[in-house]
Amino acid sequence: MNQYVLSCCSTVDLTPERMQERDFRYLCFKYTVDGLEYRDDMGVSMSSEELFRRMSGGAETKTSQVSVEEYREHFEGLLQRGLDVLHVTLSTGLTGTYNSACVARDMLAEKYPERKLYVVDSLGASSGYGLIMETLADMRDGGATIDELYGWVMENRLRMHHWFFSTDLSFYVRGGRISKASGAIGTVLNICPLLNMDNEGHLAPREKQRGKRRVIKRIVEMMEQHAENGTAYSGRCFICHSLCMEDAQTVAAMVESRFPQLNGRVEIFPIGATIGSHTGPGTMALFFWGDKRVN
């Protein structure tokens, strides 16, 4: 039996049931809605539907990452039980949580010299980060050691592709990610930006598609272009969305049609509160294993 655990944060955007099923130990980010604080606990404290309804009504949201002390307590609770830990964080391109986890790791190194505590920057986010964790869990359950998992994820994390689009630019304007002028022009022209995550874990705009039908077609073409073995891709595929289930289901059906060797059906998850606080409703993302990401 492997005496180690897989650890992550709630920004993997899976479900509480899935986290328990795969035996992930996790910490929760926090967020506020109009000044009231909640745990980003994958919809337990507040459903994604309620969060996005409030945001659409003008509610102000802010997020906060896991602190060094929270990491220290989390890690030490596992190390005290004689367990080694592989912890994977949300991308450093989006937050400083990796650095906080490393500080906590270093604080505990001298106290538990016999234990292994690896911290990995996923260079990913949301259900793409979740798909990395799922793959590590598959390897763990297949008998891989913690050292084998650490080596594998460091070598392969940039093969996790994140492609996404948004049909509502207002929250990108509100968060300062695009200018008011660009947002206004984009809304008038029905522009749906297609973005992905680059090799440093930053969100990168790639194309401007006019209309939702075109951007949906294009996001599936990106999977055809980049997926491991092309349309013969036999890995898993995850989708997440913020109040646009119909778009997610449309993309899922197209992917299942064009990639007949998929490992199971495309799985769809809601975007969690931390990521969703910045994207707002109307965002859909597609995740799969493929070629190595480059800028």
Image: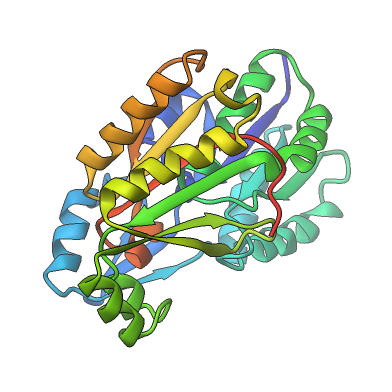
Q: Which image quarter is the C terminus in?
A: bottom right
- Looking at the picture, the colour scheme in use is rainbow
- Left or right of residue 274, residue 57 in this image: left
Residue 114 to residue 211: above or below: above
Quadrant of the snapshot with the N terminus? top right
On screen, 123 above or below 114? below
Does residue 279 sit above or below 125 in this rendering?
Answer: below
- Drawn side of residue 22 relative to residue 254, left or right: right
Residue 257: image quadrant is: top left
From this viewpoint, which residue is outermost toward the left?
A: 57
Asked if one can make out residue 6 in the rendered structure from this viewpoint, the answer is yes
Q: Which residue is drawn at 45% across and 15% down?
A: 264
Residue sitting nearer the eye, 14 or 261: 261
Q: Where does the image place residue 121, in percent across and percent down from the top left?
A: 68, 53
Residue 101 location in percent, x, y? 67, 58
**Residue at (21% x, 58% y) in the render:** 51
Q: Is residue 256 left or right of residue 263?
A: left
Write down the quadrant of residue 269 in the picture.
top left
Looking at the picture, tell me which residue is in the foreground, 189 or 85: 189
